[in-house]
Image: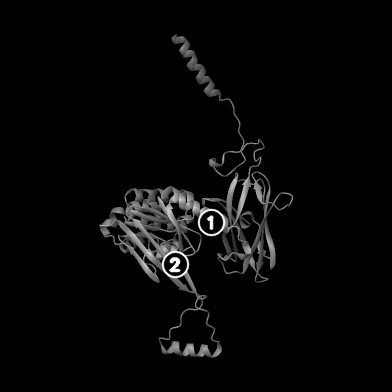
């Protein structure tokens, strides 16, 4: 008997862009369609322009007990692949076979009903996974303890915070003993302690011989957890192999991507009311620079253009990541009380960082703009920032790059501890008497 639990052969998935397909199934539909046709021209986009291929002829095989990372940029097809394997959506063509009971966590609260309590959702989700009530009873206390929602287990989950919702959703998916566990980038929602807890649980699941597919942008987590990995790009399989080999290929692709001018980037999200067009780094005296220095002032300027003169309540986030995907630093105007109630139609946002706190190395920068709470533009890995050694501490010394990436001001001192000195003197005196 084969030990292959997931087999994907020439799997493809396409989506139609633009208007939904018209189906005249009722008299009302026929009448409305006829009236619309009187006032609209027959504008039919070309077949190619109206179709988006999320996956194109993907083929792979995963053995029982393998822990596999699926990595790639946004829009690469990672989530679509997991949704097909979880039977949430159907492929357009190709084969996707999966042998075994599947537990999936593809977005926060997948399979939860907001009106039901945490207890009821645990039993509902377990039943969906094919568990008996007796099996769920046996695991229930462990699930609730892991999720840290004991006080709220009989409260409808619509009243949960996003963190509570996520903790319970993950706990159910991981503890009900699925043979195959599919996990998307939902761990980014939790805090650091919870992420560490989840990774530990996934490690326990893997050691029990169960199969895990893990989609993440955190390369450190992927390298720590997964033995093999697949890199997807534009819906196609780019490469596969050992995790280190695939992660290295992905990091190289980031460098190439960041060379594309910001205004020409098409892999962006948002309603487009405001779009980033350029980003520039300057030194303390305003001179453009290609690199930053640890401990020196850095001025980050982001140019933009909007489609309206009335873009209100603008929030700008500049997020800085290590190349392995580890989040390092976020700069945000609202956090420091710099409210942009309205902005010019064309302009630039500037953020001044005194004593830039990152140690030498390369980092990627993602840009996000919200207007009235709605994402207007979001470009991940918009540009690379190179940080060179600088005299952050005024001593000419910096820690090695392997000793963490964040530098903080610190003061040290030493002082005499009288009690300790008296204790040591007493010990010495007793020893001399014994002699």
Marks 1 and 2, the one that precedes in the sequence: 2
Q: Is residue 274 visible?
A: yes
| SS under mark 1 | helix
Q: Which mark is residue 36?
A: none
Please state if 21 lies on the left or on the right of 255 as rendered: left
297 or 42, which lies in front?
Answer: 42
The image quadrant of residue 70 is bottom left
**Marks 1 and 2, how far apart in space?**
19 Å
Q: Is residue 123 above or below residue 192?
A: below
Q: Residue at x 51, y 50 (%)?
A: 324
Q: Which residue is mark 1?
A: 253
Q: Few, some or many C-alpha atoms within 10 Å of disc 1 (few <14, some 14-19, many ≥20)?
A: some
213 or 141, which lies in front?
Answer: 213
Q: Few, some or many C-alpha atoms within 10 Å of disc 2 (few <14, some 14-19, many ≥20)?
A: some
Q: Quadrant of the C terminus?
A: top left
Q: Residue at x 62, y 66 (%)?
A: 275
Name the spot of residue 343 as percent of width and height, x first: 68, 65
Q: Which residue is mark 2?
A: 56
Name the spot of residue 243 as percent of width and height, x first: 44, 51
Name the spot of residue 428 as percent of width and height, x first: 49, 15
88 or 421, which lies in front?
Answer: 88
Q: Is residue 314 visible?
A: no
């Amino acid at each position: 008997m084969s030990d292959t639990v997931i087999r994907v052969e020439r799997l493809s998935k396409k989506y139609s862009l633009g208007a939904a397909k018209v189906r005249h199934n009722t008299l009302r539909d026929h009448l409305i369609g006829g009236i619309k046709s009187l006032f609209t021209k027959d504008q039919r986009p070309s077949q190619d322009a109206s179709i988006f291929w999320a996956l194109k002829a993907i083929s792979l095989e995963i053995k029982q007990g393998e822990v596999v990372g699926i990595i790639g940029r946004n829009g690469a097809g990672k989530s679509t692949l997991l949704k097909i394997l979880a039977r949430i959506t159907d492929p357009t063509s190709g084969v996707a076979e999966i042998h075994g009971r599947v537990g999936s966590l593809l977005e926060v609260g997948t399979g939860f009903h907001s009106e039901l309590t945490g207890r009821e959702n645990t039993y509902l989700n377990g039943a969906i996974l094919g568990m008996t009530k007796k099996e769920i009873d046996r695991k229930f206390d462990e699930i609730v303890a892991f999720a840290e929602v004991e006080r709220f287990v009989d409260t409808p989950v619509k009243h949960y915070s996003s963190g509570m919702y996520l903790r319970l959703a993950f706990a159910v998916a991981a503890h009900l003993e699925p043979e195959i566990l599919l996990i998307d980038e939902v761990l980014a929602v939790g805090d650091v302690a919870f992420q560490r807890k989840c990774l530990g649980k996934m490690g326990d699941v893997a050691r029990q011989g169960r199969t895990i597919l893990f989609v993440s942008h955190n390369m450190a987590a992927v390298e720590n957890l997964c033995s093999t990995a697949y890199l997807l790009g534009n819906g196609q399989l780019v490469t596969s192999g050992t995790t280190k080999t695939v992660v290295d290929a992905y990091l190289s692709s980031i460098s190439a991507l960041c060379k594309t001018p910001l205004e020409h980037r098409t892999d962006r999200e948002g309603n487009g009311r405001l779009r980033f067009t350029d980003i520039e780094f300057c030194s303390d005296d305003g001179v453009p620079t290609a690199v930053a220095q640890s401990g020196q002032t850095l001025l980050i300027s982001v140019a933009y253009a909007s489609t309206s003169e009335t873009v209100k309540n603008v929030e700008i986030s500049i997020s800085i990541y290590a190349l392995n995907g580890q989040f390092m630093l976020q700069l945000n105007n609202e956090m420091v009380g710099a409210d942009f109630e309205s902005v010019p139609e064309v302009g630039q946002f500037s953020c001044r960082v005194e004593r830039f706190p990152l140690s030498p190395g390369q980092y990627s920068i993602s840009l996000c703009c919200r207007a009235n709470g709605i994402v207007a533009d979001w470009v991940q890995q918009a540009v690379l920032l190179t940080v060179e050694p600088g005299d952050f501490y005024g001593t000419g010394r910096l820690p090695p790059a392997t000793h963490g990436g964040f530098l903080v001001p610190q003061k040290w001192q030493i002082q005499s501890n009288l009690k300790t000195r008296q204790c040591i003197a007493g010990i010495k005196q007793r020893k001399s008497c014994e002699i």
